[in-house]
Amino acid sequence: MGRLSTAELPQALQALFTEVQDTKMPLTVFHNGVPLVVIYPASNGKQRPAFGVMKGSGEILGDIVISALPETAWEVLQ
């Protein structure tokens, strides 16, 4: 990750944006030795939704109510 002080920012802004996009590496901007902002390259890919990602991927292969083991196999029921 690169480092840059705010004093250097105005002169190098366009070149830095181009470098971040080309290298795909984030750049941290510091002010008085303290991290101020991190610049990440923009992604061209479509973002996947977080909700509903697995919709339609499951399949019920048997009875979901009755146990797969007989009641005699359960210690707690004996």
Image (tube, rainbow, N blue to C red):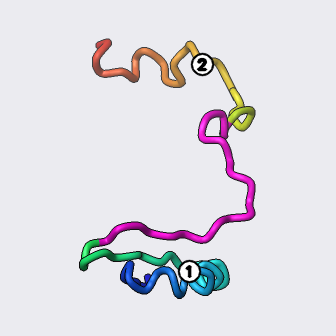
Instruction: Give the side of residue 50 with respect to residue 74, left or right.
Output: right
Q: Amino acid at mark 2?
A: Ile
Residue 36 is one of the magenta-drawn residues: yes
Q: Is residue 51 above or below residue 30?
A: above
Q: Is residue 6 above or below residue 73?
A: below
Name the residue at 43% across, 15% down. Answer: 71
Badge number at residue 72: none
Magenta residue span: 35-54
Which residue corresponds to mark 2? 64
Name the residue at 30% across, 75% down. Answer: 31
Name the residue at 69% across, 27% down. Answer: 60
The Cα–Cα distance between marks 1 and 2, rounded to whole angstroms, is: 59 Å
* Quarter residue 1 falls in: bottom left
Residue 52 is one of the magenta-drawn residues: yes
- Callout 1 environment at 10 Å: few (<14), some (14 to 19), or many (20+)? few
Badge number at residue 13: 1
Q: Secondary structure at mark 1?
A: helix
